[in-house]
Image: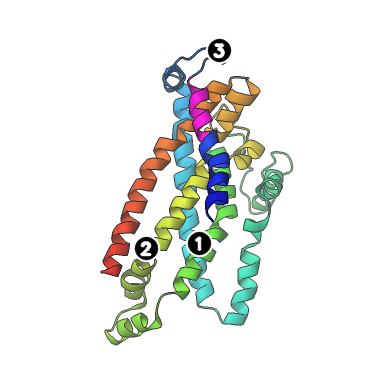
Amino acid sequence: MTLPLLLVIGGLVAYPFVYAIYLSMLNKRMTRFIGLENFTFLLSRETFQGVIWQSVLFAVGAVIAKALIGFILAHVLHALPAKGQRKWRGMLLVPWVIPPAISTLAWWWLFDPSYSAINWAVATIGIPPVAWLGEPSWARFSVILVNVWYGAPFFMIMYLAALKSVPDQLYEAAAIDGASAWQKLVYVTIPMMKNIIAITVLFSLIVTFANFDIVRILTNGGPQDKTHIFGTYAFQVGIQSGDLPLGAAVSLFMFPILAVFAVFVLRGVTRRSKEMAG
């Protein structure tokens, strides 16, 4: 019964991963095996060292912001009556269900240097215009902002489901013991949600590290390669420059970083599950 699923996973995940490893060990013309030379070449380049830093900043910064915003929104929705909750839940999920490429184009217009709606709005209160996509620090902020806007609803819906699974008896027992709202959050809600929080963060981290369309549409890695992440840089090197082995090597740098995160997160989830079962 699981054979069709295993075939799909093998064809869409395992085979491309193994083939990418094979490609990354070939020369540019794909005629000679060169081992790890592509990886050592990339690590020696200042541009790629910046890509590693920018990818980590983009992914970790965006995931932390999405987790915090999603957590707050989930608590606000959880406190609403059921009828109003359904309406707000539907509206807040809109950014997540819109295709990222389409919503990113709308943000690109908002950040446009000549016709920026955001700059027009802030100009009405006397704030000078900002080069959102033309200055490195603002460009990094902009791509993270768009990713947060797109991904926060996913955290919200996951955390809302987790909140609904917390037994009311725990809150009642905490109230009898004189616990404040903050103490209920710290000692009841968060411990009961830890596994969901960890799994959601890990899943989002994987998706965010592999992101391509937001950076590609907004900045294309600019200005001066200051917003490139693994996905966009791999596309530039592998497809636009015609060096598929080097592009494959760029994409494979995500694997050890994500593997470290996954080991720590899943180890914590396993330990907490055993404690709850015991």
Which of the two residues, 107 or 244, is positioned nearer the viewer here?
244
Rendering coords of residue 156 (x, y %): 52, 64
Residue at 56%, 16% in the rendered image:
30
Q: Is residue 89 left or right of residue 262?
A: right
What secondary structure prevails in the magenta region? helix
Q: Which mark is residue 194?
A: 2
Residue 237 badge: none
Mark 3 vs mark 1: in front? 3
Residue that label 1 marks: 70
Q: Is residue 228 left or right of residue 101?
A: left
Q: CA distance from mark 1 to mark 2?
A: 14 Å
Q: SS of the residue at dot 1?
A: helix
Sooner in the amino-acid sequence: mark 1 or mark 2: 1
Which residue range is magenta in the image? 17-25
Question: Is residue 267 one of those drawn in magenta?
Answer: no
Q: Is residue 21 magenta?
A: yes
**Mark drawn on residue 31:** 3
Residue type (three-letter) at the residue carrying disc 3:
Thr
Up-down relation of residue 18 to residue 127 (above or below) = above
Q: Which quadrant of the view contains residue 193?
A: bottom left
| Above-or-below relation of 248 to 114 | above
Kindly identify the amino acid type of the residue bearing the numbered disc 1: Gly
